[in-house]
Image: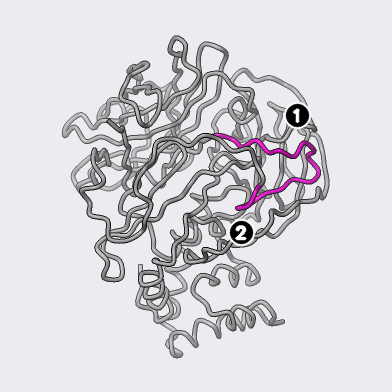
Amino acid sequence: MRFYIFLSLILLGAACKSGKTAQQTQANTPGQTVGSNTRTNSRPSGGSASDSRPLARPSSVLPNSTSAPAPAPADWAVTSIKGKFLIIDSTSIRVYLNLTGQQPDGSPIKTADDLASHFLVNYVIYPDYNSRDRLGYGNVQITNQAVVPNGDYLTLIFDVKRPAGAINGILLTEITETNNGKKALNDLPVRFRSTKLSDRYALFDKDGKLPLLRNYVNLKDTVVLRDVNGTVKPLYTFRYRHDFEAASSPMNTTTRPAPKTLTVDSSLVVTTSQPFRMPSEGLYFFLEDSTETYGIGMVVADNRFPKLTRPEKLVKPVLYMSTSTEINELNNTKEIKKAFDRYWLNLMSGNEEVARRAIRAYFNRVEEANRLFTTYKEGWKTDKGMIYVVLGPPDRVQRSRDREVWVYNRRANVSEINFTFNRKPNQFVEDHYELVRYMEYQPIWYPIVEAWRTGAIRE
């Protein structure tokens, strides 16, 4: 029987960032091929998540729901979980979970004592998403040492012993509210034996204590690349200055163009376990050996990111709701701010209030897409980011090791629509997904785009 894990919007925001890092056939670092068309070694796929055809799927085809229930106003609730693991040694791994939660009055959960008073944490390790056989399980003690305040999050830290003979597995963590039994779940693919840099090292805050669990930093940020043991060693670091393309239409089923080759703009050496700050924006790639083909990628963005504030950047994401003529006008103008304002006012028939609401709603989605889905490029440019910006968060997500299916209910007079994303190998990040495109998306996509263009979508 297939063991499928379904996540609500709550857990989508917490989607774990620990898939397999890609290996690429090219051996030399200075010319990396990246993006949707990366030439990489193929890997066997995990269990099929769903029939990937997009339209009118009855909810009964999605069994075994383990979604976290939407919290009632009077409940304590964990509202998001984001996970990462690092290998300690051949016998164990360390797990980091960034949690957000709310108290009955709606205020955030801020202390380990609050978490310990109202929740229990346990985990189970399965061989894969399509197996119910348990490799191991355990309880997590919620203490002041295990739970650390981390900005908007609480970071829960615990170690997991490697089950006998296990090389990898799926770590399912359950956080249960003790009064009503409601569960918040996080599924995290883990590896107990790996030579991958990203399984041993991660980005931490400037003190080297708390993991960032994201693929981007701001120019002003001081960060640390470190492993669990605080190893000090040099990492070869390459910078790529490249304006990556945004995702193409969900209906674009034409053959993908040939993969692009990136040229190194500059290089430097970063020492692990020591604070550093990057000198300029761009995509940075960290390697233990300059001849390796996979490592850790990191986007360095301006200090407002994931918000977009510069006019030359604001005009780009409207690609998903624009005609080719409108895009050309925005891209070729010398007065970008005026062109941007004129674009929205023209769409909203000159109504400034409607235009302001539409801009706010659209770019809130863009900001959240950047926060959730930035990989080797900004989140809004990814396939997931495109769907998120236009349709918003899915009603539920079904995930296997190498696939996610986003399910939307009641969009454009269709009872249900599915978007399937397949994980693809990528040398920079572990969580690169590509949308399976279909012409059948047209009757759903175009009415929603038109709703954006008329100001009918408001948040």
Instruction: Specify which label sits upstream in the sequence, 2 or 1.
Output: 2
Q: Dot 2, how many residues are within 10 Å of its Cα: few (below 14), some (14-19), or many (20+)?
A: few
SS state under label 2: loop
Q: Which residues are magenta?
A: 20-38
Of residues 164 and 311, which is closer to you in this image? 164
What residue would you read off at disc 2? Answer: 256
Q: Is residue 110 visible?
A: yes
Q: Magenta segment, principal secondary structure? A: loop
Q: Is residue 357 visible?
A: no
The reply to whether the magenta stretch includes residue 367 is no
SS state under label 1: strand
Above or below, 425 relative to 300: above
Q: Quadrant of residue 100?
A: top left
The amino acid type of the residue labelled 1 equals: Thr
x then y, percent, for residue 129: 37, 31
Q: Which mark is residue 232?
A: none
x then y, percent, for residue 218: 64, 49
Residue at position x 49%, y 85% from top?
A: 345
What residue would you read off at disc 1? Answer: 271
x then y, percent, for residue 124: 34, 22
Of residues 171 and 233, which is closer to you in this image? 171
x then y, percent, for residue 294: 68, 35
Q: What is the quadrant of the C terminus in the image?
A: bottom left
Answer left or right for 162 relative to 328.
left
Of residues 67 and 269, which is closer to you in this image? 67
Separation of marks 2 and 1 at Cα, in angstroms: 38 Å
The reply to whether the magenta stretch includes residue 28 is yes
